[in-house]
Image (cartoon, rainbow, N blue to C red):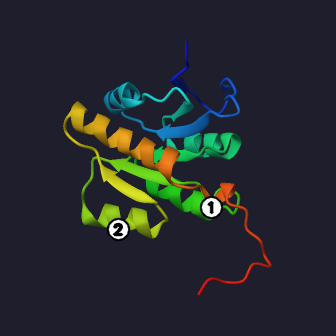
């Protein structure tokens, strides 16, 4: 049986992923939203690590080096905006892809997330069917199509592209 998600805190260890298994940190404090997201995850090659607040998210991201972070903005304690700011100011985490999933479609929230370094922003839809379709697209793009910066070898001596 494949483990789809691990609900973690900084003091709880999760099973290590197989060499091919990707890691996604899901940062969500709302039980109903988290339950719906967990129902949407369908990739057996992905280990989902759950953080219920910003502090736990930063701890998981620092210790587990995920391939993707799905981040809620509105959380008690450290907000999603503060998590974004912290990740983007840390040279070790700078290139971690971050997808914001929020109920807010307020222009100021969207703009702030992008200003702080979010790779993309999605407003959580109202139906499970729409959420499932959104999560499938996020997984296909960020875990399938997109190349992560850490997987691309950069040479200092390469000529610049014009």
Is 32 positioned to the left or the right of 78 in the image? left
Q: Residue at x 73, y 68 (%)?
A: 154
Q: Residue 9: give x, y in percent of width and height.
A: 60, 30
Q: Decide: marks 1, 2 in contact (CB < 8 A)?
A: no
Label 2: few (<14), some or many (≥20) within 10 Å? Answer: few
**Label placed on residue 111:** 2
Label 1: few (<14), some or many (≥20) within 10 Å? Answer: some
**Label placed on residue 106:** none
Q: Residue 35: give x, y in percent of width and height.
A: 36, 26
Q: Residue at x 48, y 30 (%)?
A: 43
Residue closer to the observer: 45 or 40 = 45
Q: Residue 29: give x, y in percent of width and height.
A: 41, 36
Give the labeled residue for mark 1: 94
Q: Where 19 sits versus 105, above or below?
A: above
Residue at mark 1 to residue at mark 2: CA–CA distance = 19 Å
Secondary structure under the numbered disc 2 in the rendered image:
helix
Residue 73 visible in rendering: no
Residue 62 visible in rendering: yes
Quarter of the image containing the N terminus?
Answer: top right
Q: Residue at x 59, y 37 (%)?
A: 23
Is 32 positioned to the left or the right of 20 in the image? left
As drawn, the residue found furthest toward the right would be 157
Residue closer to the observer: 57 or 38 = 38
Q: Residue 139: give x, y in percent of width and height.
A: 44, 42
Total number of numbered labels?
A: 2
């Amino acid at each position: 049986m494949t483990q789809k998600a691990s609900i973690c805190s900084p003091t709880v260890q999760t099973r290590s992923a197989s060499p091919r298994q990707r890691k996604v940190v899901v940062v969500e404090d709302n039980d109903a939203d988290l339950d719906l997201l967990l129902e949407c995850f369908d990739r057996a090659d992905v280990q989902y690590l759950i953080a219920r607040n910003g502090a736990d998210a930063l701890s998981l991201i620092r210790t587990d080096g995920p391939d993707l972070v799905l981040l809620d903005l509105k959380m008690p304690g450290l907000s999603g905006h503060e998590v974004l700011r912290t990740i983007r100011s840390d040279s070790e985490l700078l290139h971690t892809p971050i997808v914001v999933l929020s109920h807010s479609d307020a222009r100021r929230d969207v703009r702030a997330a992008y200003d702080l370094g979010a790779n993309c922003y999605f407003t959580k839809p109202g139906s499970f069917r729409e959420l499932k379709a959104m999560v499938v697209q996020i997984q296909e793009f960020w875990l399938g199509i997109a190349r992560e910066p850490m997987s691309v070898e950069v040479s200092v001596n390469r000529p610049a592209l014009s």
